[in-house]
Each structure stands twice: as structure tokens, then as C-alpha cells.
Image (spheres, rainbow, N blue to C red):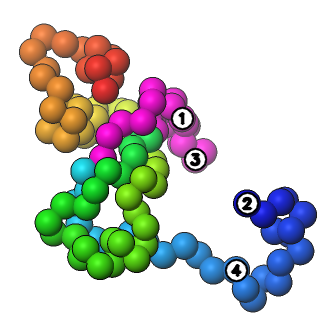
Amino acid sequence: MASFEEILNKPASEIEAPKAYPVGTYHTVVNGVPEPTTSSKKQTPGLIFKLKVMRPMEDVDAAAAAESQVVGKDIRHTLWITDGSAFMLKQFLEEHLGIETGSKSLKEMIAEA
């Protein structure tokens, strides 16, 4: 890994944005406890889930996924938590992570993630 000084001394013309991962669905696992965050503009509270890519699914171009070396990489998935968006957190926990709702609160479901 380059040092702070090496990065600052690198010619700006040589710096490129990282390429996006190939479009599609990935099998991931939650990698640790979600990190609380707050948006800078409106101070909206949120959670950052760290997901580790295990493998691309059938709808991902396998060659492109292999070239981008996406397996083993971490993805940060941020969910903002307001009255109007709490359903998206519930959907993520229930439909994507497979956590049963029953009579659980969102807090209890997050603990299971």
C-alpha cells in the first residue's frame, strides 16, 4: 500500500477512479456490526452495513467479475433511517438477509444481522 506522502506526490494525471463492479447480483455476508452514521446535510441517522462479496450470481458476467477481482472485496451498504424509509431497512433485513420479523423490533433484527 502506498504511503500518504507517495499518494500526494503522484501526478494527478495518473489518478483514476476505481471501476464499478460488474452489474448484477452477488452473494455476500454481513462482515461485522453495522456502523452508525449521520448524513452531513440533514443530519439523518443511518447504518452502514459492511458486506463481503462471496461470489457473483448467475446474472453477473463471470469474466468481468473475475477481471475485477470482486470476490473477497468489501461493499458498504448505507441505509438511512427515518419514518419514511424504515421500510427499506426492514426489507433489507427480512428479504435480503432472511431474518424473520415475527414480533421483533428493527433493533432486534439488526442484532441478528
The residue that disc 4 covers is: 15
The residue that disc 1 covers is: 37
* Range shown magenta: 28-48
Gap between marks 3 and 2 measured at Cα = 32 Å
**Is residue 15 shown left or right of residue 85?**
right
Mark number displayed over residue 81: none
Task: Indicate whether residue 105 is drawn in magenta.
Answer: no
Q: Position of residue 60 (x, y in %)?
A: 22, 70
Q: Nearer the viewer, mark 3 or mark 2?
A: 2
Residue beneath the point at 12% across and 23% down: 100
Gap between marks 1 and 3 measured at Cα = 12 Å
Q: Position of residue 1 (x, y in %)?
A: 73, 60
Mark sitting earlier along the chain (4/2): 2
Q: Secondary structure at mark 3?
A: loop
Mark sitting earlier along the chain (2/1): 2
Residue beneath the point at 46% across and 50% down: 74
- Return the residue found at the far bottom: 13
The residue that disc 2 covers is: 1
**Is residue 34 shown left or right of residue 87?**
right
Local crowd size for mark 1, using a 10 Å CA cut-off: few (<14), some (14–19), many (≥20): some
Q: Position of residue 17 (x, y in %)?
A: 59, 75
Residue beneath the point at 89% across and 74% down: 9
Gap between marks 4 and 2 measured at Cα = 15 Å
